[in-house]
């Protein structure tokens, strides 16, 4: 057994002269998670295969400059609002707000400079069986167009039983909206030259949100039964991704929001991902109402640096626990409103094992 500990080193410096640090969380089992203060990015996460060997299983860059230039939200914290807002517009208390439009005519993942592109303050905490990194940031009133000064804290905790917890907490000084998430790309093979089509996936959802050609929900849910979107039983991703389906054509694969079955539980299973060649298993539990499964369909267009493509499409996948896309404009969706005096709280746990 090893000691649970946290190591810190300089990872780089932004063009504005801000020092970016890398923190390495290590548990007694030997699992390691690297997190950099730029974007709160998980830049490495190791997991054992069935032979007991650890390998990194999240897509990453090895230098800050690549993260500064990259545009795939690789491993980053996302906010204030994860996913899309139609036309970058919403209304609160009869006041219209225009947030930045950074994906055509729509707003995506917090805008031009969302949580993924800021340097977070960091503090560490070690207990007998876990190591925690607490990241904090203050988003000013009308930053990217959002109302209210938002104070947010995100706590990454690595436990000795190989669970990585992500706890989100926030307050605001005026009515606003919030929907943070974590955008790691997983490839449980540990070989990032391989596609994720051989991974076996389960999604704990009877329905999903169909979208229009701009990836905005059409309104209402659609049953997964009899469609390629039915992952209620574990199946290989490659078995469904090439089927003829209008929604798959729109997303160029899977890039949709599944509505989770809660069964009255606040912390519920969202997804299970298995790679049979290595035996690695990832289970995702969350208090969020939904999960966005993105199969990395356009990675090759976003993960390039100095004219060199670093990752090709479908070499990683995301399981983003969150509220529904475009929630501020769809009254039938669960509310993402945060009022002064209220405390926002959400938690997701990534549990790693092998079989």
Image (tube, rainbow, N blue to C red):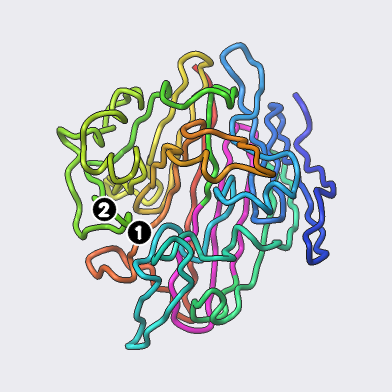
Callouts 2 and 1 close, C-beta under 8 Å: yes
- Residue 102 x %, y %: 48, 64
Q: Which mark is residue 325?
A: 1
Residue placed at 44% from the left, 42% from the top? 319
Q: How many marks are shown on the rendered structure?
A: 2
Residue 226 in the magenta stretch? The answer is no
- Residue 221 x %, y %: 20, 52
In this view, 166 is above or below 46: below
Q: Residue furthest bottom?
A: 94
Question: First in sequence: mark 2 or mark 1?
Answer: 2
- Residue 288 x %, y %: 40, 53
- Magenta stretch bounds: 152-181
- Residue 160 x %, y %: 65, 33
In this view, 189 is above or below 182: above
Would you name the residue on which mark 2 appears?
211
Residue placed at 26% from the left, 32% from the top? 232
The residue lying toward the viewer, choosing from 323 and 241, is 241
Dot 2 crowding, Cα within 10 Å, few <14, some 14–19, many 20+: many
The kind of secondary structure the magenta stretch mainly shows is strand
Residue placed at 70% from the left, 56% from the top? 38
Per the image, label 1 sits on a secondary structure element best described as loop
Position of 212 compared to 128: left or right?
left
Q: Quadrant of the N terminus?
A: top right
The residue lying toward the viewer, choosing from 245 and 337, is 245
Q: Quadrant of residue 198?
A: top left
């Amino acid at each position: 057994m090893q000691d649970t500990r946290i190591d810190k080193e300089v990872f780089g410096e932004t063009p504005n002269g801000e020092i970016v640090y890398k923190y390495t969380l290590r548990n007694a089992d030997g699992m390691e998670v690297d997190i950099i203060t730029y974007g709160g990015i998980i830049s490495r996460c190791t997991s054992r295969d069935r032979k007991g060997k650890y390998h990194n299983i999240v897509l990453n860059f090895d230098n800050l400059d690549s993260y500064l230039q990259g545009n795939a939200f690789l491993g980053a914290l996302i906010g204030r609002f994860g996913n899309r807002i139609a036309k970058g517009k919403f209304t609160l208390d009869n006041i219209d707000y225009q947030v930045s439009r950074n994906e055509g005519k729509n707003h995506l993942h917090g805008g031009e400079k969302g949580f993924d592109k800021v340097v977070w303050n960091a503090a560490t905490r070690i207990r007998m069986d876990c190591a925690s990194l607490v990241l904090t940031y203050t988003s000013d009133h009308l930053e990217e167009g959002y109302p209210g000064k938002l104070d947010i804290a995100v706590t990454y905790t690595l436990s000795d039983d190989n669970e990585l917890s992500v706890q989100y907490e926030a307050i605001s000084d005026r009515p606003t909206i919030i929907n943070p998430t974590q955008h790691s790309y997983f490839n449980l093979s540990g070989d990032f030259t391989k596609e994720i089509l051989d991974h076996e996936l389960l999604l704990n959802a009877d329905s999903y949100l169909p979208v229009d050609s701009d990836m905005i929900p059409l309104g209402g849910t659609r049953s997964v039964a009899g469609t390629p979107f039915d992952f209620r039983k574990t199946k290989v991703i490659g078995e469904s991704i090439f089927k003829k389906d209008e929604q798959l054509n729109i997303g160029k694969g899977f890039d949709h929001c599944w509505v989770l079955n809660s069964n009255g539980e606040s912390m519920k299973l969202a997804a299970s991902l298995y790679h049979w060649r290595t035996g690695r298993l990832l289970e995702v539990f969350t208090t969020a109402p939904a999960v966005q499964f993105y199969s990395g369909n356009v990675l090759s267009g976003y993960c390039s640096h100095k004219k060199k493509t670093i990752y090709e499409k479908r070499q990683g996948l995301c399981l983003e626990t969150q509220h529904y896309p475009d929630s501020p404009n769809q009254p039938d969706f669960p509310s993402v409103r945060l009022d002064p005096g209220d405390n926002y709280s959400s938690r997701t746990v990534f549990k790693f094992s092998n079989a």
